[in-house]
Amino acid sequence: MNNKIRIFCVDDHPLMREGIATVVNSENDMLQVAQASNGREAIEYFADERPDVTLMDLRLPDMSGIDAMSTILKKFPEARIIMLTTSEGDTEIRRALAAGARAYMFKSMPPRELVDTIRHVHSGKKRILPEVAAHLAEHLGDEALTGREIDVLQLVMEGSRNRDIADLLSISEETVKAHVKHILQKLGANDRTQAVTIALRRGLIQV
């Protein structure tokens, strides 16, 4: 056991945790030593177990996986954390890597990619798989939404009208209309509904 890579899995779905445990424990050089179902448990259990590699889901019930990872890295900067998620949004990929993730993987990837990435990260390296790089490259050079534009788009997604958005953000209705126009242009969307769909897919806003 002392020679095995000690794995910690953080995911709110029991079947996913058990599936990962099956994959990991079938490898001669790996052992899953702990599981957590939310961010709070992840932070607590990491401190107790000090695993070699952590597999962190992006979306957890109580906080984002990125926030949980950032909290862990503040106390344990040597932590090696892999984001393992269904989210393919380029914004979330960039955010996770900027926050300190050593790799970003989609749950749809083959088990062999998972164990290979675990070994790669355990050796002290970072890994960007071709599928992840493709999602990043798709929007490379796109003009980013401003913080205010994201606020507006979030409220559009929630069903707010321009007048409601203006009141909530303490700006004029004309300013809201200008923000919406810029949002449509930057996202290449034809209307508000399409803009919301694109933004959700890219991880710019959250449900």
Image (cartoon, rainbow, N blue to C red):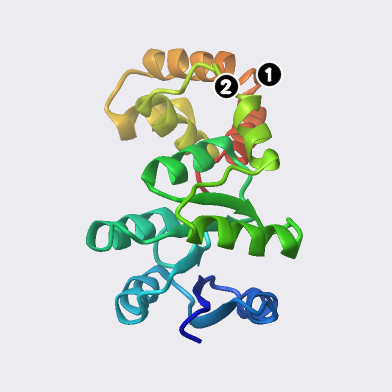
Q: Is residue 63 left or right of residue 182?
A: left
- Kind of residue indicated by mark 1: Asn
Q: Is residue 82 above or below residue 165?
A: below
Q: Residue 51's spot in the image, x, y percent? A: 41, 74
Amino acid type, label 2: Leu
User: Measuring 63% from the left and 79% from the top, which residue is drawn there?
Assistant: 21
Is 72 on the left-hand or right-hand side of 22? left
20 vs 6, left or right, is right
Observer able to see residue 57: yes
Placement of 55 over or under 103, stated as above or below = below
Mark linked to residue 190: 1
* Residue drawn at point x = 31 percent, y = 77 percent: 44
- Residue 4 locus on image (x, y percent): 53, 78
Q: Residue at x 53, y 62 (%)?
A: 57
Q: Pinpoint residue 34: horizontal percent, then vertical percent.
A: 47, 82
Q: Give the residue furthest to the left.
A: 75
Foreground residue among 136 and 26: 26
Disc with the residue nearer the chain's start (2 vs 1)? 2
Q: CA distance from mark 2 to mark 1?
A: 21 Å
Q: Nearer the viewer, residue 189 or 16?
A: 16
Question: Mark 2 = which residue?
Answer: 140
Quarter where residue 81 is shown? bottom left
**CB under 8 Å between callouts 2 and 1?**
no
Number of other residues with Cα within 10 Å of mark 2, as a class: few under 14, some 14 to 19, many 20 or more:
few
**Tag 1: Cα neighbours inside 10 Å, few (<14), some, or many (≥20)?**
few
Which residue is outermost to the right?
A: 110
For the question of whether residue 160 can be seen, the reply is no
